């Protein structure tokens, strides 16, 4: 036994060192793909948080909110038209218990006047446009807008129709194949191999196994995108367990397994963009902070922010979801200390919510403060000074502390 360990332990140690070395420097083994686009804000179901999902009105609104990726699902009508629709059956969307494939395009019913937003029971989206749209119309309206097209069913005719439309509109480099099933993705790749691929569910499991076994640096990755819901978002409404504590535990474990900074950085260096779905508090929940690399891209449903700060101003945004927080002109002082390090004092902020006020003894004395959180991702950012009990500290009343760990300089300034 001792002789086995004598050889095995050094071998395992050498393997671990090599694995870590190439995990951090994958370009020594692999030539990274050059992405045709780098989305920073995507619209789930075309922007279902503010308008009726997958309508042209929702997509135009998403564009107005500076989205640079549309996430769409497609179905095929009886007369062979590719339409943008999440569900094959129209009951949820239109109240008509028929499948899209059983109707011609002209026979498709209107959407309901309001639709409950996915992952957010009790929240509804409304809009004046209730018409289902063709994928062809989307490509014509947004010719250079990157789009993720998800195929849910093994419908080869649908897959080939999508592939043909992508070629016709010369969108091979900016249209992503997406599906949860590997069998479907295999057919998608065969139909149009020029389109970038995203990971399927089985491929994500394989990716994680390779990562934790230390084999990932030595294995080729054909996918260019990792699309997934952030586990702690799903926990709010999606995990099936009746016990909320078990749901939270599952979310924590899943988050720990997937949201590894070294994994995301490794993928980024190999040309794989990680897109994690987060949603607004009006559209669906999201939590933070996350242990992600700076290159991690987030997809969200507009409505992403309540308020938008002008592009001509230097501004600060939430580090976890990019929601606008404050203009540089409203910065009072950089000389404050938060619970997790340095913090800035602002005269006014946007897109934040306040908790109940409570008295706390801070470095400068007793104050009544209320914790503030990002309205978009619910991350605690700092606090608001409600009342100062010492006359020398009165200038802080009504002002806001935001910790540097939770904000970034946005709008291209240093």
Image: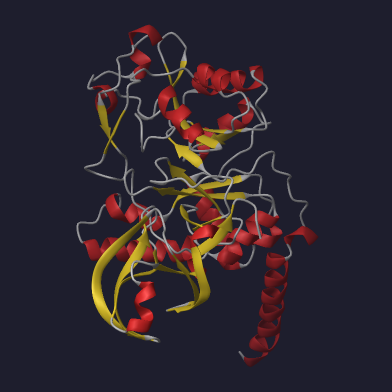
Work out whether residue 153 can be spotted. Answer: no
Q: Position of residue 197 (x, y in %)?
A: 60, 39
Q: Position of residue 237 (x, y in %)?
A: 28, 50
Horizontal placement of 139 versus 385: left or right? right
Q: The N terminus is located in which quarter?
A: bottom right
Specify the farthest residue to the bottom. 2
- Residue 253 vertical placement versus 231 (above, below): below
- Residue 165 vertical placement versus 52 (above, below): above
Specify the farthest residue to the front. 391
In this picture the colour scheme is: secondary structure
Q: Position of residue 241 (x, y in %)?
A: 24, 56
Work out whether residue 188 can be spotted. Answer: yes
Q: The C terminus is located in which quarter?
A: bottom right
The quarter of the displayed image where residue 91 is located: top left
- Residue 128 vertical placement versus 399 (above, below): above
Most foreground residue, 180 or 236: 236
Q: Residue at x 34, y 66 (%)?
A: 398
Q: How many marks?
A: 0
Most foreground residue, 86 or 355: 355
Most foreground residue, 263 or 102: 263
Q: Position of residue 288 (x, y in %)?
A: 42, 62
Horizontal placement of 22 versus 372: left or right? right
Horizontal placement of 62 versus 297: left or right? left
The quarter of the displayed image where residue 12 is located: bottom right
- Residue 160 vertical placement versus 320 (above, below): above
């Amino acid at each position: 036994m001792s002789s086995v360990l004598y050889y095995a332990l050094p071998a395992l140690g050498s393997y671990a060192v090599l694995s870590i070395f190439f995990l951090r420097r994958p370009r020594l083994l692999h030539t990274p793909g050059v992405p045709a686009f780098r989305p920073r804000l995507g619209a789930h179901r075309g922007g279902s948080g503010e308008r009726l999902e997958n309508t042209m009105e929702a997509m135009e609104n998403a564009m107005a909110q500076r989205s640079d990726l549309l996430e769409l699902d497609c179905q095929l009508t009886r007369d062979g038209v590719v339409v943008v629709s999440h569900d094959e059956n129209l009951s949820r969307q239109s109240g008509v218990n028929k499948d899209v494939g059983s109707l011609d395009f002209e026979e498709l019913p209107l959407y309901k006047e309001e639709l409950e937003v996915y992952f957010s029971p009790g929240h509804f989206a409304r809009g004046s446009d209730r018409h289902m749209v063709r994928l062809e119309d989307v490509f014509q309206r947004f010719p250079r807008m990157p789009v993720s097209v998800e195929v849910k069913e093994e419908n080869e005719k649908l897959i080939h129709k999508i592939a043909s439309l992508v070629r016709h509109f010369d969108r091979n480099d900016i249209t992503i194949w997406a599906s949860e099933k590997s069998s479907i993705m295999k057919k998608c790749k065969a139909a149009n191999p020029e389109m970038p691929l995203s990971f399927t569910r089985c491929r994500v499991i394989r990716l994680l196994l390779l990562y934790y076994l230390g084999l990932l640096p030595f294995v080729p990755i054909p996918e260019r995108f990792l699309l997934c819901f952030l586990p702690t978002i799903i926990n709010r409404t999606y995990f099936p367990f009746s016990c909320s504590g078990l749901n939270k535990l599952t979310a924590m474990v899943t988050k720990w397994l997937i949201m590894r900074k070294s994994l995301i950085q490794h993928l980024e260096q190999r040309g794989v963009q990680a897109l994690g779905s987060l949603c607004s508090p009006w559209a669906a929940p999201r939590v933070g902070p996350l242990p992600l690399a700076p290159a991690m891209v987030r997809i969200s449903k507009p409505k992403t922010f309540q308020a938008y700060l002008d592009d001509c101003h230097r501004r600060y945004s939430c580090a976890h979801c990019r929601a606008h927080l404050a203009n540089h002109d409203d910065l009072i002082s950089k000389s404050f200390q938060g619970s997790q390090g340095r913090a800035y004092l602002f005269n006014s902020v946007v897109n934040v919510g306040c908790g109940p006020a409570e008295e706390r003894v801070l470095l400068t004395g007793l104050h009544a403060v209320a914790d503030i959180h990002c309205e978009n991702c619910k991350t605690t950012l700092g606090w608001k000074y409600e009342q100062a009990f010492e006359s020398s500290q009165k200038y802080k009343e009504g002002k806001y502390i935001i910790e540097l760990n939770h904000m970034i300089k946005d709008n291209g300034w240093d």
